[in-house]
Each structure stands twice: as C-alpha cells, then as structure tokens.
Image: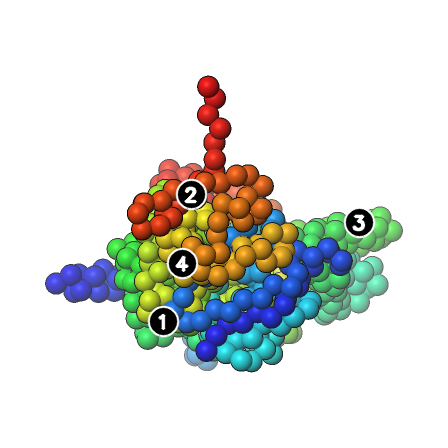
C-alpha cells in the first residue's frame, strides 16, 4: 500500500508537469491564429481560415494574411522562443538567474551592425545580415576574451559586460556621425525593436538559425542541468565541462543574434520568461527548455499584438516589454516571496 | 582492483607544492580517512584522485590503468566524488539532484530512463532519505543535503567513492549517521576515501588513515597504529591525549591546561 500511494503521488506531479509543458508548447498556435485576425484591418476567422487554406477570399485579404501578417507572426513566435530559450540556457550555464540572452554583448554587436548598415544604406536584408554578423562577432569576442583568461564563468560574464559597453559606444559613435534627419531616427527606432517590416525573406534565415539553435539546445537539455553544478562536480560526473559550455554559448548566441537581427533590440523576454517557466515547471532543463520556448513565443506574440493594435502607429517592442513586463515581473516576484519559496 | 596513487605531486603555483610525493593504495571494502591541518593538501589529494586535477608528477592508477588516460565518462563510471555541499544554482528536487549521478551512464544527447529512476530510488532508500525525494534540496538541513550528495554518489554506481569532509558542520548524531552509512557501504564492497578534521572519525569508522602535513605524508596505516598523540601533535601543532577504555584507545582530545 505504501508503494502504491508513493507511485500515485509521483504520477500526479509528473503527469501534471508533462501536460503543462505540452500546453505551453502548443499555446503559440491559437495565439498565432487569433493574431491573424487583428490589425489595422480586422478580419473574420472565416476569412483568415480561407486565406490559409486557399479558399475564396479577395486577393487583398489573402495577401494581407499570407504575405504580411503570417511571416510577421511566425517571426514573432520564433524571436520569443529563441530569446527565452537562450536566456534559460545562459542562466543555467552561467549559474546566475540574473543573466539573460544578451549577456555576451550580442545586442550591442547587432545594434552596431544594423547602424552601420543604415549609414551605408544597404537595405533591409543588409541590415539583417550585418546585425546578425555584428551580434555573432561581439559574442565571439566576449568568448575569446573569456577563454583567454581561463574560461571560468566569472571572466566570461565580465568579458560580456566589457564587450557590451565597448560596442554600445561604437553604436553611439555611428549615431553621432549619422545623418540626423534620415539615418539617426532609423537607427534609434531599430534599437527600440519591432517587427513591422518582417516579410518572408526576413523570416527564412531566422527560421534556419532557430532550427539549429533550438534543436541543439533541445538535444542537450538534460545535460544543461549538470552545468548548473559547480565545475568540479560537473567534471567529476564525467562531463567535458568547457566543451559543453562553449557549445551551449554558441547555440544560444546563434539564437539571439538571429532574433535581434530581425526584431531589433527586445529586452525582458530573455530574462523573465525563463523565470516564469521555471516557476511553472521547475528548474529541470528537460522540461524548462521546451516550456520556455512555448511561453516565450506566446508572450512575444501578445506583445506584438499590442504593439500593432493599441495605437494608430506601432509602438516599439522594447518599450512595451519594459512597461508591461516590469510590473508583471514585480507581481510574480512578490507572489513567489509570499509563498515563502524565495526566488530561485 | 585498487585505486593507487604513486608519488604524486601537485602545485597550484609553480614551485609551491600543495602535495608532494604522496602515495596511497585503496582496496575495495575499506574506508581510508585523509587527515591533516587546514591547507595540508587533503582536498587537493581528493581532487587528484577523482580526476578533476592532474598531478604534475607521479601517477594515479585505477585498477592498473593510468587515470589520466581514461575518458571523463569512463572515469566517472568508476569514481564518484561527493563534495561538501550541493552547489546547484537552482532549486532542484532531491530526486532530480540524485538523478544527476546517472550522468556518466546517459549518452551525450540522451536523458535518464526508467531504469535510472529506479537506481535513484534505490540510492535514496539506501541512505534513508526516500521520504524527502520530492523536496527541494535548498530547503533541507545540512545533514540531509550531505545525504543527498552521498545518494548521488551511490547512484553513479562507481566502485570508488571519494568524500570531502562528510562529517563537517554536522551534529554528533548526523555525523554518526553519515559515517555509519559510509562504513556500511564499504562493507558491501565500495572503496571509500574521506577527508576529515576529526581524528576520531578515523578511529571509529575507518580501516586506514593517511595523515598529511604541508602536502607530505606524515603517517599512514591502521588508525590505532598510525595515530598517536605525538604524531598528531606534529600534524596540528598542539598536544593531544588519549582517552581509552579497557579495550584500547577510543579517542584523541586536545590536552587542555586547567587553570588553578
């Protein structure tokens, strides 16, 4: 009888957690569909459905759904998932819950790439390409510096901070020399984040990078747990710690750089969504990583819906994530403290 | 079958040896205690033995083969290391934490299976903390956490278990509980090395002892033979006296001068 009640108790939590992870992973689907209805031109569910399945709808409606809204929404979902997953992975391997996906200076590097592309007038794909390269370059530099000083966690974080502020200064330098009437506003708006210009051509490179990064981290996700132990413990458990840490950072950087190059700088998601996911399904990365992916996608889709529909003009994403995200985080935080669990 | 260190030396800073020329042999079924003052090289020796550090001179042989030649996963299947405290950055449950001990048996992209889960249960039963298995490790007492780590070491199913100060920061009951668990494990065929600051732990629970001073071996052998007030005085720099009953020495305690 002892054994029976024991088994039943375990099953209940494990079934609940598995169900929660599955629900979070599926959550973006209905939100994408619902978001297809929203916009400056409100559409009915039937029109959207018909557009997706090739039914009879006016060509303008089909174009709006398939060529404008769908790529943007799918990009929003991927950006959200990428930032949340890389944030969760980085918080794990840096053993620090305050770390986020931008810790290694990816955003600043991507910002520099985008700013340069705008000054050089190289068009939307040039902006995406250069900011992607800039992001990878900055994080690569941070990793190189970190490795040169022994590859420990602290030096890696410190290198990220250094590279971040260095590249931020470079962005300011480019802004300073940019044409104040045309280029400067462009750079400033890009840095505030937004998805209004995303089309399929922007979406596919993002999808390819996401497939590699998300796929890799999903495969590694149980091992990520071991990297959250002390280095000696992880080594004693037979882990090639430095190699695995490097691989994780590389995959996370790929995700972040690909996302930032499409969406501009979007804060908050890569820091808070991992915490929210951890509060829901616990710290085991086996469940945390997929949960963070689904939750991140859902949250960014909702933010993007607000950005598109709240005011006649688009609101930059980074402003929204900050204004709404911070109070929400605060409420979550207070609830957790009241529950007496602390915030971990 | 043995874990052997041959004349190993280790220096954190070139020229300054934390460990020099230390040799030891551990057979399955025995508990070997490492004693010595703070900074005498106990932890360094332990970390060399479990393959986290590589000695600059000498060699470590695991069942006859050089430890450094083993791939990390193979090594971890045969030597388990139990640190003083769990240092996880997040609030894992006891069960999850012990499951990490299965890492060397799980493939690089794999995840633990039902069989691993069963081994975890067995390990938790063995150290007597199964009822805690759903608790978060960071909500447990110091003694319970220590037992979680020992269970993790057991779940690793390695024939050699290396423990860093298993009896530190614990009340006498918990000390006894943990060291009895360790002694019983050795009786079942495990080879155990444990560092300690308490010579009496070696007397009560160990088959052998190795006493270090400034990285060198001061004494080695059966606890009753190797340890004496004189040798302890040399190791720690204070005078000791023996307490005993009819059967022989039971404990060493520092000699305290009473004021008149």
Q: Residues within 10 Å of mark 2 (few under 14, many from 20)?
A: some
Name the subunit of mark 4: B
Q: Secondary structure at mark 1?
A: loop
Name the subunit of mark 3: A
Q: CA distance from mark 4 to mark 1?
A: 14 Å
Q: Secondary structure at mark 4?
A: loop
Q: CA distance from mark 2 to mark 4?
A: 18 Å
**Is residue A149 visible in the rendered structure shown here?**
yes
- The residue to which callout 1 is attached is B189
User: Whole-percent x and y of residue B59?
Assistant: 62, 72
**Front position in the image: A279 or B171:** B171
Q: CA distance from mark 3 to mark 1?
A: 63 Å
Decide: marks 1, 2 in contact (CB < 8 A)?
no
In the drawing, what numbered circle is on residue A117? none
Q: Nearer the viewer, mark 4 or mark 1?
A: 4
In this picture, is B39 found above or below B63? above
Q: Nearer the viewer, mark 3 or mark 2?
A: 2
- The residue to which callout 2 is attached is B242
Name the subunit of mark 2: B
Name the residue rendered at 38%, 48% in the picture.
B249
**Front position in the image: B73 or A114:** B73
For marks 1 and 2, the one nearer the N-term is 1
- The residue to which callout 4 is attached is B206
- The residue to which callout 3 is attached is A169
User: Whole-percent x and y of residue B87?
Assistant: 49, 53
The answer as to whether the residues below labels 3 and 2 share one chain is no
Q: Secondary structure at mark 3?
A: helix
The answer as to whether the residues below labels 4 and 3 share one chain is no
């Amino acid at each position: 009888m002892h054994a029976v009640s024991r088994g039943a108790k375990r099953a209940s939590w494990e079934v609940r957690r598995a169900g929660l992870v599955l629900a979070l992973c599926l959550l973006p689907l209905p939100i994408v569909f619902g978001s297809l209805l929203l916009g400056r031109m409100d559409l009915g569910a039937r029109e959207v459905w018909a557009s997706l399945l090739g039914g009879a709808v006016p060509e303008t409606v089909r174009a709006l759904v398939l060529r404008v809204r769908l790529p943007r929404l799918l990009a929003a979902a991927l950006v959200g998932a990428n930032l949340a997953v890389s944030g969760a992975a980085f918080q794990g391997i840096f053993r620090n819950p305050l770390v986020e996906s931008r810790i290694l200076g990816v955003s600043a590097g991507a910002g520099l790439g985008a700013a340069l592309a705008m000054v050089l007038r190289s068009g939307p794909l040039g902006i995406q390409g250069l900011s992607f390269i800039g992001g990878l370059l900055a994080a690569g530099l941070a990793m190189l510096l970190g490795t040169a000083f022994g590859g420990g966690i602290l030096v890696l974080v410190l290198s990220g901070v250094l590279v971040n502020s260095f590249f931020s200064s470079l962005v300011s330098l480019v802004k300073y020399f940019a044409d104040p009437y045309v280029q400067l506003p462009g750079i400033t708006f890009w840095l505030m984040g937004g998805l209004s210009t995303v089309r399929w051509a922007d979406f596919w490179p993002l999808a390819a990078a996401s497939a590699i990064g998300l796929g890799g981290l999903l495969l590694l996700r149980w091992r990520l747990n071991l990297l959250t132990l002390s280095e000696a413990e992880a080594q004693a458990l037979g882990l090639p710690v430095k190699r695995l840490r490097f691989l994780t950072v590389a995959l996370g950087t790929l995700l972040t750089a690909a996302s930032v190059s499409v969406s501009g700088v979007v804060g908050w998601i890569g820091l808070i969504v991992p915490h929210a996911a951890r509060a829901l399904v616990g710290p085991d990365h086996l469940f945390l990583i997929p949960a963070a992916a689904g939750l991140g996608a859902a949250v960014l889709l909702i933010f993007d819906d607000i950005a598109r529909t709240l005011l006649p003009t688009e609101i930059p994403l980074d402003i929204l994530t900050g204004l709404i995200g911070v109070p929400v985080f605060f409420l979550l935080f207070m609830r957790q403290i009241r529950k007496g669990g602390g915030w971990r | 079958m043995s874990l052997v260190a041959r004349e190993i030396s280790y220096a954190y800073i070139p020229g300054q040896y934390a460990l020099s020329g230390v040799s030891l042999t551990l057979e399955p079924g025995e508990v070997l205690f490492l004693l010595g003052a703070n900074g005498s090289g106990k932890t360094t020796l332990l970390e060399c033995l479990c393959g986290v550090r590589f000695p600059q001179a000498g060699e470590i042989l695991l069942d006859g083969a050089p430890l450094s030649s083993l791939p990390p996963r193979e090594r971890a299947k045969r030597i388990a290391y139990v640190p003083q405290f769990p240092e996880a950055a997040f609030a894992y449950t006891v069960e999850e934490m012990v499951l990490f001990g299965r890492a060397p048996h799980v493939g690089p992209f794999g995840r633990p299976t039902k069989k691993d889960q069963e081994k975890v249960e067995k390990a938790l039963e063995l150290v007597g903390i199964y009822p805690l298995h759903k608790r978060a490790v960071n909500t447990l007492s110091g003694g319970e956490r220590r037992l979680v780590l020992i269970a993790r070491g057991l779940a690793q199913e390695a024939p050699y278990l290396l423990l860093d100060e298993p009896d530190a920061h614990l009340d006498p009951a918990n000390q006894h509980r943990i060291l009895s668990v360790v002694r019983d494990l050795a009786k079942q065929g495990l080879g155990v090395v444990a560092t300690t600051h308490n010579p009496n732990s070696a007397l009560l629970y160990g088959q052998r002892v190795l006493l270090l001073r400034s990285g060198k071996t001061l004494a080695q052998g059966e606890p009753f033979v190797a340890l004496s007030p004189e040798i302890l005085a040399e190791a720690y720099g204070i005078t000791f006296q023996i307490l005993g009953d009819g059967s022989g020495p039971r404990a060493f305690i520092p000699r305290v001068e009473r004021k008149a």
